[in-house]
Image (cartoon, rainbow, N blue to C red):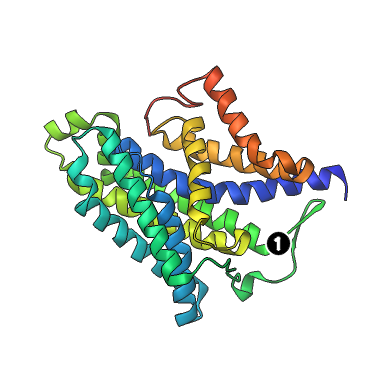
Amino acid sequence: MSLASNLLEGVIYGTSLGMLYVLVAMGLTLIFGLMDVVNFAHGAFVTLGAYFGITFLDMTGNFWVSMVLAGVVVAAIGLAIERTFIKRLYEENPIYQLLLTFGLALLLEGAVIIVYGQDNQLISPPSILQGAPVAIGPATIPQYRVFLIVFTGVLVAAVWLAIQRTKLGLIVKAGIEDRERAEMLGIRLSYINMLIMAVGAGLAAISGFLSGPLLGVNPHLGTGLLIVSFVIVVIGGLGNIKGTIVAGLLVGILSSLTSFFYPTLAGPSIFVAMVVVLLVKPQGLFGGVEA
């Protein structure tokens, strides 16, 4: 296999992986930007999405229906958590939010282990995406990887456009940029908090389910994706949606290329990248919290 082919495959594989990272990190970014909450339970939403997806897949036999159902159910769980627990701590010391969400993450992970066990499981791609690999230049790419890039790209673009172009999105941006002023103008941010928590949890769940054919599913799936997502949020700039998208793609491609050429450096490379960015630009590549 030629160097050009390896490079192209590394970039495309990294893009597909990076888009999954973006789905998880975008929820983190929205929740932090609007609610000022660092949500450690977000990784548990990823894991729940994967396992609920497996359950629905066993029940329906339909990959697409299972993905949607998993996203909706986990979005409802995220909404319930925000209304029941997190909303009580908005005005408290942030350490209480960290402890609460970390505790919830442990409880949800423990519940998954009790119900599903700890064995690794693999979600099969839908039959329509199991055909011959797609030739892109000198590289051959599995159909599922191509699907991931297209589908997650459309999903991320839809969220982006909703925030940039709709009235509700403008309210979300106003809350992110200046929460106090938005509340003074009569905007009920409590409802927006509910929406953002549900959307963030739903995106995380879909990412978890879509990760199944690539990474396998185990109770610690969400923890690994959460750690990478925090790195992405830091690199892109806390609360910055555009920064999250760019950083997610960069991290995915960096991780994939190092896996191709220097496998032992695949894990550390993204943390080295984060350290370099923080040394050069402590506020992240895009800085601030502008959406």
Q: Residue at x 20, y 45 (%)?
A: 87
Give the percent coordinates (x, y) of residue 145: 64, 58
The answer to which of 42 and 10 lies nearer the viewer is: 42
Total residue callouts:
1
Name the foreground residue: 155 vs 212. Answer: 212
- Residue 84 vertical placement versus 143 (above, below): above
Residue 214: x percent and y percent? 62, 60
Residue at 51 percent of width and 37 percent of height: 232
Question: Is 81 rendered above or below residue 216?
Answer: above
Amino acid type at circle 1 is: Pro
Q: Is residue 189 left or right of residue 252?
A: left
Q: Residues within 10 Å of mark 1 (few under 14, many from 20)?
A: some
Q: Position of residue 31 (x, y in %)?
A: 33, 42
Can you identify the residue that label 1 sits on?
142
Can you say which quadrant of the picture contains the C terminus?
top left
Rendered location of residue 261, percent (x, y) = 79, 41
Quarter of image, res 212: bottom right
Picture quarter containing residue 72?
bottom left
Q: Residue furthest top?
A: 280
289, 170: nearer the viewer: 289
Furthest residue toward right:
2
- Element at label 1: loop
Residue at (56, 68) in percent of width and height = 119
Observer-nearest residue: 17 or 168?
Answer: 17
Q: Is residue 91 left or right of residue 242?
A: left
> Is residue 67 visible in this depiction of the protein?
no
Residue 19 visible in the displayed image: yes
